């Protein structure tokens, strides 16, 4: 596992790592930073793993996500999603990040601090978001203890939105 301070500001890639059920991984220079895998078919529940820790991400209601420690079930964070791609990420300890849409094509989002500075940004491939994309953990974002989780959460949000669009088409 690479130290996030080493890779801050460097473009990371995320790509499909499994198909049945879907799984994705974030890589840097051939090193796996974290993984995201859906627990079963046709579910919104996924397990994110990074740096020896596992979190369960699940939908709660129509526009909210809950992130829990996979081992203990304790709440770690929640995400409120708004129309048109924005939202808020609230950690259980009271910290708050804003979620903003950064681009429409290719699909992109960023988690920002209170000053509007990007901490973690995630983008999908233009041709097919299901194939993967790239992300960047900014130097300020590398100071977040959950920076890898935030990046995996961004991948989850992009894939979930793409699935919903594909279902509605």
Image (tube, rainbow, N blue to C red):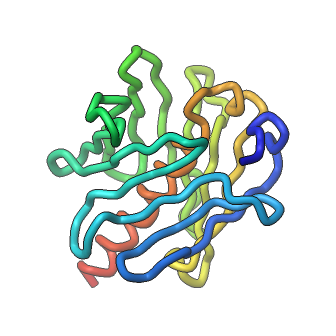
Q: Residue at x 68, y 62 (%)?
A: 134
Closer to the camera in the image, 169 or 51: 51
* Residue drawn at (34%, 47%) of the image: 56
Asked if 70 appears above or below 41 in the picture, the reply is: above
Q: Which image quadrant for residue 139?
A: top right
Examine the rendering and report whether any part of residue 79 can be seen. no
Question: Looking at the image, which residue is at 26% across and 35% down?
Answer: 73
Position of residue 156 measured from the top left corner of the image (x, y, whole percent)? 43, 57
- Using residue 78 as the reference point, say whether residue 32 is left or right of it: right
Residue at left 25%, top 75%? 41
Q: Quadrant of residue 114?
A: top right
Residue 94 vertical placement versus 109 (above, below): above
Residue 28 at x, y = what percent? 77, 58
Q: Is residue 51 visible?
A: yes
Can you give x and y, in whole percent of width and height, for residue 39 in the image? Answer: 30, 64
Q: Residue furthest top?
A: 94
């Amino acid at each position: 596992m690479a130290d996030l301070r080493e890779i801050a500001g460097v473009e990371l890639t995320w790509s499909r790592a499994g198909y049945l059920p879907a799984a994705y991984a974030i890589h840097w220079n051939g090193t796996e930073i974290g993984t995201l895998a859906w627990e079963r078919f046709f579910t919104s529940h996924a397990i994110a793993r990074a740096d020896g820790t596992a979190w369960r991400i699940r939908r709660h209601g129509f526009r909210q996500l809950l992130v829990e420690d996979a081992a203990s079930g304790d709440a770690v964070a929640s995400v409120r999603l708004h129309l048109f791609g924005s939202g808020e990420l609230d950690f259980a300890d009271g910290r708050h990040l804003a979620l903003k849409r950064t681009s429409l094509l290719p699909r992109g989002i960023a988690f920002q601090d209170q000053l509007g500075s990007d901490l973690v940004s995630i983008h999908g491939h233009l041709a097919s978001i299901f194939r993967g994309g790239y992300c960047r953990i900014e130097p300020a974002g590398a100071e977040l203890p959950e920076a890898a989780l935030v990046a995996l959460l961004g991948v989850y949000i992009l894939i979930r939105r793409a699935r919903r669009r594909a279902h509605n088409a």
